[in-house]
Structures are given as C-alpha cells and as structure tokens.
Image: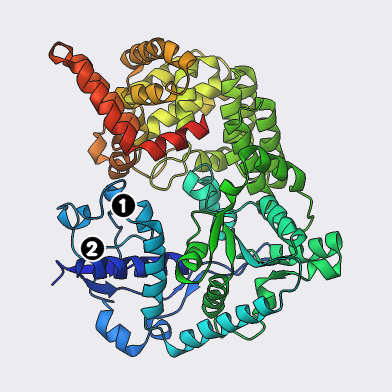
Amino acid sequence: MNENLILASRDDGLGERLRAFINALYLAERFKLDFGFVWEGLNTFPSEIDGNKLAPTCMLSKEEMFSKEFIAKYCYNGKFEDAKDEFNRFKRKSINTFKTTKALNPPYRITQKRLDEIFNDIDKKEYEAKCVEIFSKIDFNDKIKELFKKAQNKIQTLKTSLTGGGGGLCAIHIRAGDVIFLKHNQNSVIKPNIYHRALTYPLALEIIHQELLKNSIIIAFSDDLSMLDSFKIYFNDLLGKEQSERFLISNDLCNEHFEKPAYKALFENALMSYVDKIYCTKNSGFSTLALLTGKVKEGIVVYDYFSKDKQYDLIEKYTGKIQVIHPFENVFACFQAFRLSRELKKPLENSKKWLLKALEFDKENDVYRILMLDCLFLEKNFKEINSMLENILKTRKNAFFATFFSNGRDFNFSFVFNNFLKNFKKGPYINYIAANIALNLHFNELFEKYLKFSKSYKDEELKELFSSFYEINCNLGAVFRMQNHLAYRLGMAMVKNSYSFKNLLKNPFEMLGIYLDFKKNSLKSKKALNELDDYKQAIRFVQDSAFYKLGLSFLKGLKLWYKGGVFIFIKECKNLSLEYKKEKKEFKNTL
C-alpha cells in the first residue's frame, strides 16, 4: 500500500506546507504515484513581543482548509507521523533517480523546496506553470475558495486604478518573524539558511522608495506588523501624502474581519500571488508560495538585486533611521552589515563597529560577543581576548555558554572552537574556554591537558574558576570533528586557493602545513562518530561536500601514485567541478 504513496506531511508554516502539497502532486502525476497528506492545526508564534505587533504563525484544521471529499480521499492523519524528507540526496541529479533509487523509505515524504532547484533536468518555466495548474486543482474548503476570489478581485481593482507614469503593481515581502524575534534563531543567525530567510529592513526601505519614484503602487507584506505601521509614517513624512498613497501595507487591503489569523495569512498570500512582481528573499516559504501559485510575472530576490557593496551602503544609510523600529530588527541589520563587511574584506575595524552597534541595540545578545572574539583572534589580540573573557565569565558566564554551545542540528559556533583549542597557552581565560570545548566534545586527552596546564596559575580566582565547568545536555560534535578531518581541510584549501594564480602557487605549502598540523593536533574522542546525534548531519553536509570528496580523492591519488593516482585525481577534479559548480561559485563569494 505504501510503496506508491507520496506524502505531504510538513507541520510548519503555510508556505512550506502548501509548497510540499504542490510538489507531492507534481511527482504523483509525473510518476503515477498515490498522493496523500497529513495536516494538523498549528498555533505557535506569539502575536506580540515587547509591545511589537507580529503576525502569529498558525494553521487551520484540515476541515477548515479542505473539502470533505478531498479529506476523505487523500488524508492520512493518524496513520503516519511527520518525518524528515530525504530529497537532499537528489541534489544535482536527474529527476528519474527519484524512482530508481533504493534509498528512500516509503511512503515518500516530499520536500517543500523547489524541485527545479533540486533535480538538474526540470525546466524552470515548465515547473512554475505546472505549479499554478496544480494549485488551482486543489479542492479547498468553500470559505478558502471565496477568500482567494476576493483577493483576486481586490488586486484587479487596484490594477485598474493605476494611472500615468508607467508604474506597475508590485509587492515586497519583508520576512522577519521567528528569524529575528525568537532566541533560537537569533543564536543561529550566522547560518545562511537563517540570515537569507529574513529581509533586513534597510533594503526594503530602498526598494519601496525606488518603486514609488517610478510611480508604481507597492504593497508591503510582513509578519512584523509594527514595522509596517512605522514604514507608513516614514514615507508619508518623506514624500508627502499624495505620493506616499501609492505605498500600501497588507492591512490596508484587509479591511474585513477575519475569524482567525490563518484566514488573513491565506488572503494576503493570494493578494501577493496576483501582483506583477514580488521582491522577496529566496528562503521565504510564504513569498515563494505566492510566486508558484498565481500570475506573478517576476520574482526578485533582494539579496541578489543589490550588489554586496550596495547592500552595505544601504544598511549604513538606513539603520536606526526609523526610531520606532524594534531593536531586534536593528540587530539583524547590524549582523547583515557585519557579514557583508567580512565578505567584502573591509578592515576588521568596520566589522567590529557593527558588532558593537548590535550590542547597543541588544546588550543581552552574546552572539555578537562571540563574533567579536573571533575578530580579535584574527588580529591575534590575545590580551584583549582575555580581558573580554574575564569580564564575560564574571558577569554572564551561564548566558554566554548557553549561546556559545547553542545548537540546532550541530553547534552554531563550532567555527571558533579551534581558535581556543590551538591558543590555550595565550591566557588563562582562553584556556578555560578551550577546556570547556574539549569537555563537551568528549576530547578527554585534551581536557586533561588544559586542566594540567591550569595548575600553573597562582591566582586564587583562577583556581576557583577551573574547579567547575559548563556541561551541556546534548550529544553533538560529529560535524565539528568531520570538518577537522584531513580530507575536508585539504579539500577546502584546494578550492579556496583555486581562484587566483597567486594562491595556486602557495597551495602546496598550505596543504603541507595542514598535514603537519593534523599529525600534531589530531582530535581524539572517547565517543565514536556514529554515537553522536549529529552524525547523519555530518554525513549529509560535510562528508558529502565537495571539500571532503576532493580531499579524499587527493589522498587516494597520493596513495596510488604508482598506479597513476595523479591522473585519477585530475579526472575526479573535473567531475566534482561539474557536480558542484553552483556551490563553488557560492563559496567564492564568501572568500
């Protein structure tokens, strides 16, 4: 029964769920599979934080969402629980591998991600057209169908009101919500899937301003409702009432009472789906749903629309300009400026400036203290590092460690761990952090080494400090350990040094240094990799990465040098270059 069943069973927000629906129906039709879904109600996100109005994340029940006939025919509630999809294994492969692979466990759990960006042989335009067709055939509840019709009529009325200037009707989706306001995601902000999901408000201000100057009507959608109200006031003051009347926020078009917030979210998404173009972020499920289900002519990813230099300038121009914007919005803007300053190779003083500014907006956010420590390590300013750590450990030790060891599927800040492990002799407080890292990653020999070194400290406060350690209640470390494997480190060096002739010349010396460091400082743990909770994560995102595969091929080539290992390695390089072409380009942009 389950062999031919493809199941849409996500339990998160509107955009992700309905995109999974569309994908499941797409593959069911293409491969003659049975479609099914699991759908539970949801109400998880608050409607207010610190007096700031937010759109709550909630979901209708299956009865409120779909027709009785649709539920009876396709619903599998109670028969299957939600489970993670396995579609990442199809990245860069033909869609036909979906049916030929033996790796998937039926029923097939569908992904919410765009299938044309997973499989390498799905035509983008064909996929988008098919998504619109599929969505129109889903048998929604009559109340939902009526909402969609009202939204279409509302947009049509707006379009007919356009006069002069050649302007059009566009929308901007300023994703904020959990990324900016929830502590878990604040701690994970350094991860691309987090910081690319939300749109920093300075860029939104510039987009809106540009469109108004073109005489367009632009509608702003966001889950930060207080910010939208602030935008209305800002543009009225900036441009005057007549021109600013062409700037609308979603509430301007939602002038009827909605029984539940979920109905309003569906109405807003339908509104967005009928405009001429949408400015959004690539990772936002809500705006991507609108792009795939309506008559939108153009979707513009804001982080691609502006160059990195322009983004940096705009954040510098607008951050803090609207006084009533919530501090967390400003913190996120500061993070984006910090990230861009590093990617643009600006002086470290620029990066540190944004970190200090972020702490002005939110002094309780230890993410920016950790990033500041990373900058200081780059400067080899060990005196300042120890001074900063001394203050942290005396005033906010537990809060700092909770962020330092925060994790989702792996440690958020593992990229700074080696700074402490390799520089433990540079000061007692660096050594103390190193000891805590070794303890929590199960590196017993290292922990004993750091503890033994601490015996040389005469200060009584330091002796007391080293008498207790911060132990976390999780079983992670596989990702960090695998990223320290020789294959991964060599592969990363080869890719990093492949972009210029100058770096190619120094590559052999860097690789020799990595090898010698590995032999001297290889990490030994009392736990096997497959005993750690993030082992599957490490296999998926580290061992399956281009870096690891390239490094492994290099080591195999060296081992088989007498059998033409060098030529085998060169052939493998060509294959990997084609397979990971997109990833290589993205990595270059971070250097």
Above or below 317: residue 273: below
Q: Is residue 467 visible in the rendered structure shown here?
A: no
Quarter of the image where one finds residue 77:
bottom left
Residue at 31%, 84% in the rendered image: 70
Q: Is residue 108 visible in the rendered structure shown here?
A: yes
Residue at 40%, 40% in the rendered image: 582
Q: Earlier in the sequence, mark 2 or mark 1?
A: 2
Label 1 amino acid?
Answer: Phe
Q: Secondary structure at mark 1?
A: loop
Tag 1: Cα neighbours inside 10 Å, few (<14), some, or many (≥20)?
many
Q: Which residue is mark 1?
A: 119
Q: Which residue is mark 2?
A: 108
Above or below 61: residue 455: above
Above or below 144: residue 375: above
Q: Secondary structure at mark 2?
A: strand
Residue 175 in the image: state x and y as whole percent: 58, 59
Query: What's the CA distance linking mark 2 and mark 1?
Result: 16 Å
Quarter of the image where one finds residue 150:
bottom right
Residue at 44%, 45% in the rendered image: 407
